Image (cartoon, rainbow, N blue to C red):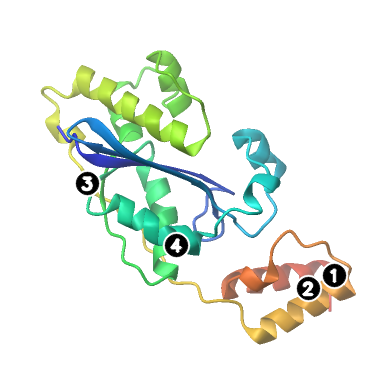
Amino acid sequence: MTDSYVCLDLETTGLDPKRDKIIEVGAVKVKNGEITGRMETFVNPQRTLEERIVELTGITDDKLVNAPEITDILPGLLDFIGDDILLGHSVRFDYSFVKKAAIDQRFKFEKFGIDTLKIARKFLPELESRSLEFLCRHFEIEHSAHRALADAEATIRLYNKLTELFYEGHEDEFKPTLLSYNVKRDTPITIPQKEQLYKLVDKHKIKTEYNVEKLTRSEASRIIARILEEYGR
């Protein structure tokens, strides 16, 4: 079985890597079955959190306002992961957010991964849920839900439990597979977009929930289109 990997978990502003942002990173390095390192940090998304995200994670805007941006922490995260296999519960979700951030900064990020959700779906079809929270209750695994490092550590304990129960005779189901997520690089907001957006915000007295200076070109286009549709020129 694979006993050396990095278990990665993220908290984000939503489910779409092309539009949403990372707000917390939790990563745990395991070598030969033993934890050898941890990485944990908040990440400033340069936007106000929706109430549903605050309720889900317990993370509030005041915890993020002085946190580093993804551009600041990404090199360290990629270095922490190195050449290791990724482990995660729905690992492609976490991989896709890091891949998007990496592409935007012109880094390569191609990984193999092991997905405890996929394994649970294969061997535990009778359960009413295979969420990390539910599985931890089912197997009496210690878990503080919806915080990145706690979720990563709980995923490791779940992986160990699943291998204990199901690995023998089903080795292929536990093999790392190539993770895939295709995404294009976003470029920063243009000067004409900034000028137009600032004018629209001022004219219509709009309270912004984002930092205009940190928007990408595509994000700015969507926001401008939404404002024009709602308020007109």
The numbered mark, 3 or 2, whose residue comes first in the sequence reads 3
Amino acid, disc 4: Ala
In what quadrant of the picture does the C terminus appear? bottom right
Residue at the spot 46% in from the left edge and 31% down from the top edge: 150
Query: In x, y percent, where is residue 48?
Result: 70, 53
Q: Earlier in the sequence, mark 3 or mark 4?
A: 4
Q: Is residue 89 above or below residue 92?
A: above
Query: In this rendering, which labeled residue sits more in front, label 3 or label 2?
Result: 3
Tag shown at residue 231: 1
Decide: marks 1, 4 in contact (CB < 8 A)? no
- For residue 228, the mark is 2
Number of marks in the image? 4
Give the position of the N terminus as an image quadrant.
top left
Residue that numbered label 4 is attached to: 101
Question: Of the residues shown, which amino acid type is indicated by label 3?
Answer: Thr
Spatial CA span between label 3 and label 2:
45 Å
Label 1 Cα neighbours within 10 Å, binned few <14 / some 14-19 / many ≥20 = few
Residue bearing mark 3: 177
